[in-house]
Amino acid sequence: MRYKTLLICLLIFALLSAGCTNTASQPGITFSGKNTPTPTPTPGYGSVMISSDPWGADVYLDGEHKGVAPLTLTNVPAGKHTLRVKMLGYRESNSNITVITDKALTIKQSLQRGKPDIYVSIDSTKIIQQGTLIEVSGEVENRGDEAAYEFKVIIEMTPKDSSMKDLKASKTVVIGALKPGDRKHYVGHVQLKRYYDYKGTIKCEYVFDGKTHTGSTKSF
């Protein structure tokens, strides 16, 4: 009987032990029963070596000016970044780059030479002085990267009757320098022969890089 009682006690003890768990052996659980905080990953860094053609261009990383090429940027956080390389007289270069941890990224940006990009509009044309004078007005705009010098607008009026081409008349409106982003208004008056029908054209001329250039022609 004594052995039977002891056997029953041992069986009960075994059953109770099997139902318990050791919290210390579970991941994320300490002896106090609190969760163990997950370690914060250490951020990675890389480097970027930047050169430009021509040399001396300004370098911007994520909108922040970093210096003049050629240069090496160290401790750049791994991941995607925006890179801008610009230089006066050249078209700026914009690109997206990806920096890899413990890696050196080499970039060479070749910049294209800028130039004027001229836009001419005709806002109004009207006949005044009993049909002997026409007034033409509009705007000129430089949408390019470089200035246009000695800029002028040329208004030409030609008789529709080709046999009367000797009655052709013109007016030159001098604008001067037209820098990138400049927009200027022009007004020109051309003397006409009475009783003749005319057709008009407008064009522009300017000096860039020591040479004279002619812009596109508009008709009215």
Image (cartoon, rainbow, N blue to C red):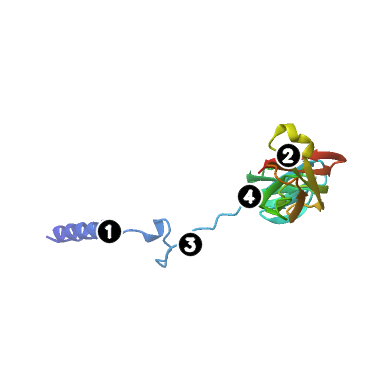
Residue located beneath label 1 in the image:
17
In the depicted view, which residue is nearer to us: 111 or 20? 111
Residue located beneath label 2 in the image:
158
Ranked by sequence position, the earlier of labels 3 and 4 is 3
- CA–CA distance in space, label 1 to label 4: 58 Å
SS class, disc 2: strand
Residue located beneath label 4 in the image:
81
Residue 153, x across and y down, in percent: 77, 47
- CA–CA distance in space, label 3 to label 2: 86 Å
- CA–CA distance in space, label 2 to label 4: 57 Å
- CA–CA distance in space, label 3 to label 1: 30 Å
Ranked by sequence position, the earlier of labels 3 and 1 is 1
Residue 28 visible in image:
yes
Mark 2: few, some, or many residues within 10 Å (few <14, many ≥20)?
Answer: many
Closer to the camera: disc 2 or disc 4?
Answer: 2
Mark 1: few, some, or many residues within 10 Å (few <14, many ≥20)?
Answer: few
Amino acid found under the numbered disc labelled 3:
Pro
Amino acid found under the numbered disc labelled 2:
Thr
